[in-house]
Image: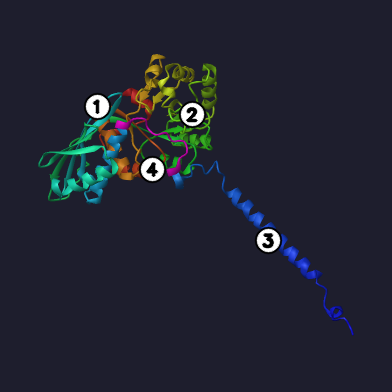
Amino acid sequence: MSDSRQNQPPRWPYYTLAVICCLTLVALFYALSSNSKTTTDPVAEMRAPVNFASLPYEERLDAPMEEGVKRIDYAILRALQDANVSASGIELVAIEQQRFGDETFHFQQLRINSQYTADELITPIATALVQWANKATLTKLSTNMYRVTFNDVETHLLKFNKITATTDFDKNPATLDIGGHLTIVIDDLGESISAAHSLAGLSYPVTFAIWPRSSYAKEIADIASAFSREIIIHQPMEPMSADAQPGPGAVYVDMTPEDIRATVRANFKLVPGAVGLNNHMGSKFTQNREAVREVALEAKKRGFFVLDSMTHAKSVFFNEAKRQGLIAFRRNVFIDNVKEVQSTLHQLKKAERIALAKGTAIAIGHPHPTTLLALQEWEKQRNPRVAVVKLSELLNF
């Protein structure tokens, strides 16, 4: 009886083919993995334009009153927007800087011109305040006037004006004489080339505050220079919260004077064309007079001016820089604590009002997509009586 196995073909070619297929699949998997890794550089994408909401180095503003006022601003604007009140019908008719404890805030008078009565608008405003600023209180003063308080301090006066026709209330054709000068500083630049191009392409000048040790510090400085935009160093400084990380190149209060100055000096070399500096974070550092003195003295050697971003109400950075003989400025408004286009536009209008009232104003924003959109929209509707100038040019006014 013959063995049927002798007539069967050998199986080793099948085993060999199976092994080759497995090896090919493994090689293909690693090749695809390698390609995907090379296309995503974690440093370059750390602040990609598509996801600015996850900025890694932000510090919560240590100013509860200012934060509360901006939440009230947002609640009012959101309610009016939902009620289909035209943005041109919301007038910021007056603004006044007031003090609450160690803080300053801006008391605002708003006139709302619309086809609705006060009674029709006050309910959605009250609802929005509960949602966005639950410590705010709304009080009726008359048929068409309401007061908003925060922590029992008056922050807003609302006047409602019912109209029968649509009117453009943003424009004031009576005069085009320049009544104030405004500087807009955009912080946190250095991780998005596209954001830099967007800012450089605006018809008015914005000041570029560039992180010295960011991925594209030099490239963004080159873009700013090509468009004649002013450049300052966005110097990282120690915050109050241990959870907030100021990033590389930061200075801390426990550093020696020599280390502070060496760190700042090294940062100065990384951003070509810079003419000044402001603080990134720094709510703890800017309260320490000895620490900020070292930064100011090193800035003085370079002929820099200083902008105190005022991330803490007790900051002494501005005063100490002035005491050391430097040209120094102080921030008036953060325009984008609330990352929403209409809110940012309102803060820009607030900055306009301050400039008209005081002669000059400084507003600070960040390269959020909503901020970039708001700046483009503001370009079309900004008050022609407010000139937008470089930070260094404020000295002339």
User: Disc 2 or 1, which lies upstream in sequence?
Assistant: 1
Rendered location of residue 283, percent (x, y): 41, 27
Find disc 1 in the rendering and name its residue.
98
Find disc 3 in the rendering and name its residue.
25
User: Disc 2 or 3, which lies upstream in sequence?
Assistant: 3
What kind of element bears circle 3? helix
First to last magenta residue range: 53-65
Mark 2 vs mark 1: in front: 1
Find disc 4 in the rendering and name its residue.
372
Side of 135 relative to 7 (left or right): left
Side of 143 relative to 289 (left or right): left
Q: Main secondary structure of the magenta part?
A: loop
The type of residue carrying mark 1 is Gln
What kind of element bears circle 4? helix
Q: Nearer the viewer, residue 89 or 290?
A: 290
Of all residues, the one furthest to the front in this rendering is 1
Side of 221 relative to 206 (left or right): right
Of all residues, the one furthest to the right in this rendering is 1
Quarter location, residue 321: top left
Quarter location, residue 358: top left
The type of residue carrying mark 2 is Gly
